[in-house]
Amino acid sequence: MVQSVLASLTLGYRPLWGRARTLVGVQLYIHPLDVNVSVDLPHLLRTLREIWSASSPPLLLSPQTRQLLLDLLEHARPGAPWIEVRGNWLNDSAIFEQVRAAQARGLRMVWRGDLTELPGPEIARCFDNSLLSLSPEVALSALRAGPERSPVLAGQMYEGVASRLVMEHCLDQRNALALAGWPTEDVLHGLRNVAPQPSHATIFKLMKAIDAEQSLETFEDILAEDPLLAYRFMTYTNSAALGLRTGIGSLRRGLVMMGYGSIQRWLGDQLPHATTEEDLQPVYQSMVLRARLTERLLEAGIETELRREVYLCGLFSQLDQLLRDSLGAILQRLPLSERIYDAAVTGVGPYAPSLQLANALESDDAAPVRQLCEEHELRPEDVNRALLRVLSEIEVPRPKNARA
């Protein structure tokens, strides 16, 4: 039996957020599991083509060693995902020659480096775009200069943006193609005096689905797209107002017990207070992505009801950031499974490895992922395949004639 290339890699990811505050792509970090063992890069490229669909998010492949980059540049063909090339690696003549050869045959590449160290014309013409980092000093000068005189180049991708103001400058004033990562901490800090609310769009979407008499599974899926709405729904279903004799520990059971008419009325009460704050969308979407990955990492061999429980574990695992309270206190307000509390709060129990891995995969640091796989006897191939499946299932609208 031929071993999958996914068994020889450690992967990680970072979302790319667009001007509409929706996901427009994914940066995929690629590490060799063993630097002394060659990786079958053609096999990896074939695997990505097989898993990815026309609606999957565009990929930016970020090889974390020079040899991986050389192999990617050699074997990738036109139509392959974008490939990141670090600016300081171009001092290596072998890499520079491979970049020139790749550009000649139509490969799309992204130059990655600091905004103050842009390449000269000969190198720059090899690249379709740039992933630029902003130092605090440059970010401050950009805000002071304003959109017309800003050093921030229009139409590029940016990373390392920790300020909401700088994020808005890049996306809204300089029309950046994407932001790698999101200034979650600063966005939430800026909204600290506003009571957190579920998304207006998600509430409205669920109300329309109920009007259209769609399936219970559809209602549950939409409800689970917003961590605050899901939490608030479960809080309500377990309140004295409903007077139920037993606790409601899942979204599905809450939907069944309430009935569609009661759900519609409850949603109608939520709608006037719901948030339309666009900058919160990536925060909520990141929590949903983490929940999907937590569920997929523990999917094999477990029944549907338990998968939903694992999903809730991932979805609620960072509610403390939104509700500004300890996670233990938040989760204890609901009759949730002890397995959820154990994993999210104390880091033990059967769901803990999946939740910890889902968090570790949101990084370019391979060490925590490898350590967790060793500790819990998880196969790298299974972890990598779960990650790629979850990422590929995200639906991203594409312009006509857009390439993967």
Image (tube, helix red, strand yellow):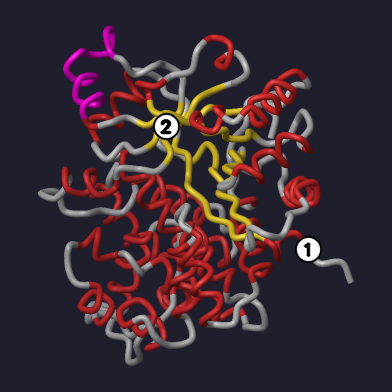
Residue at 73 percent across and 48 percent down: it is 48
**Residue assigned mark 2:** 20
State which tag comes first along the sequence, 1 or 2.
Answer: 1
The spot of residue 399 in percent (x, y) is 63, 26
SS of the residue at dot 2?
loop
Q: Taking 106 as reference, is 159 left or right? A: left
Relative image position of residue 243 (x, y in whole percent) = 27, 85
Taking the spot 59% from the left edge, 82% from the top edge, the residue there is 377
Q: Amino acid at mark 1?
A: Ser
Q: Nearer the viewer, residue 250 or 116?
A: 116
At label 2, counting other C-alpha atoms closer than 10 Å, the crowd grade (few under 14, some 14-19, many 20 or more) is some
Residue type, label 2: Ala
Q: Is residue 243 in sight in this rendering?
A: yes
Q: Which numbered tag is attached to residue 222?
A: none
Secondary structure predominantly adopted by residues drawn in magenta: helix
Residue at far right of view: 1
Q: Quadrant of residue 380?
A: bottom right
- Residue to which mark 1 is pinned: 4
Residue 111 higher or lower than 265, as above or below: above
Q: Residue furthest left?
A: 193
SS label for mark 1: loop
Which range is magenta?
137-150
